[in-house]
Image (spheres, grey):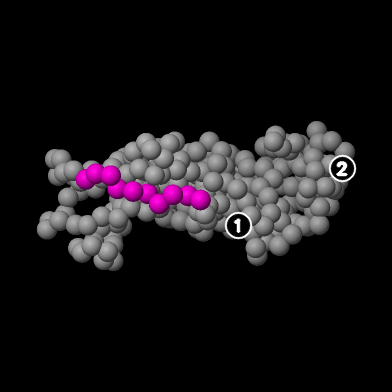
Amino acid sequence: MKKTVTLFVAAALSGAAFAAANDVLITFSTKGPDKYADGTDVLDGERYALCWSTDFSNFSIGANGVATGGKIVLSAPVAKNGHCPTIVFEVNAKKAASEYAGGSYAVYLLDTRKYADGQVVGLAGGTSSVNASGAVGASLNVGVGSVASLATSSSAAASTGTAVPADVPQPEITGIRILDGNVYVTVKGTVPFLAYSLTESATPGGEGAATDAAQSGADSQEEEITLVTPTKEGGAFFKVGRK
């Protein structure tokens, strides 16, 4: 269902002049540099999500972009130069008074990176694929017709891995081959909103060390993806799981 919310990119609250009467206006920005869980700066175009909940201690965002314990009101692909510039979230007054009544708002930084051949190849283009998230600052109660700020002078971090839905299948290794000093591991039973990687160990079922192999899942569970990692002297046993 299409959300009746609007996003203004603004240098100040001058954008409020264009808002409908009684809409909720929330300004937001971060100082940066904002980071992913691996310590790298957020990519240009990464998303900051305005979220609503009656209790943010029970709020979480799933890997498929579905929130529990609240709602994602709007996500904005506005990261630039490692931070969020000043933006204004506008929430329709009727929705604010019905769907978002009795709770508070908070902003979360999302990690929507996609992977191929072990490398980041871009962003998901929406909130349907979220690797991790992180709250930016405190939550705030904002009434209908109010103008408020959730801007923070600190940096943001998408450091909490998103929950995996219960019905997601277990990935299955379907083949292993060695070519030109690399191990190619084919896998099926993946889903497009998760990224997968390999761990290797010296014995079957042993403690594994993460490899650099990474690949976002396929559109179909029957379609195979391939994870590639350099061969290891003496050989290794592999397991596949979420990155």
Task: Tell me if mark 2 has few (under 14), some (14-19) or many (20+) residues whose alpha carbon lies within 10 angstroms of its own.
Answer: some
Residue drawn at point x = 63 percent, y = 47 percent: 49
Question: Horizontal and vertical percent for residue 190?
Answer: 41, 44
- Specify the segment rendered in magenta: 167-176
Q: Is residue 56 visible?
A: yes
Q: Name above or below for residue 67 compared with residue 128.
A: below
Mark 2 or 1: the one toward you = 1
| Quadrant of the rendering where the N terminus is positioned | top right
Question: Horizontal and vertical percent for residue 24?
Answer: 80, 45
Task: Using residue 33 as the reference point, say whether residue 75 is left or right of it.
Answer: right
Q: Name above or below for residue 163 compared with residue 21.
A: below
Q: Which residue is mark 2?
A: 22
Task: Using residue 177 as the reference point, say whether residue 161 is left or right of it.
Answer: right
Secondary structure category for the residue under label 1: strand
What amino acid is at disc 1? Ser
Which labelled disc corresponds to residue 60?
Answer: 1
Question: Horizontal and vertical percent for residue 57?
Answer: 65, 65
Task: Using residue 206 as the reference point, say whether residue 133 is left or right of it.
Answer: right
Secondary structure category for the residue under label 2: loop
What amino acid is at disc 2? Asn
Task: Tell me if mark 1 has few (under 14), some (14-19) or many (20+) residues whose alpha carbon lies within 10 angstroms of its own.
Answer: many
The image quarter in which residue 38 lies: bottom left
Residue drawn at point x = 14 percent, y = 40 percent: 180
Residue drawn at point x = 30 percent, y = 48 percent: 173
- The residues bearing labels 2 and 1 have C-alpha atoms spaced at a distance of 29 Å
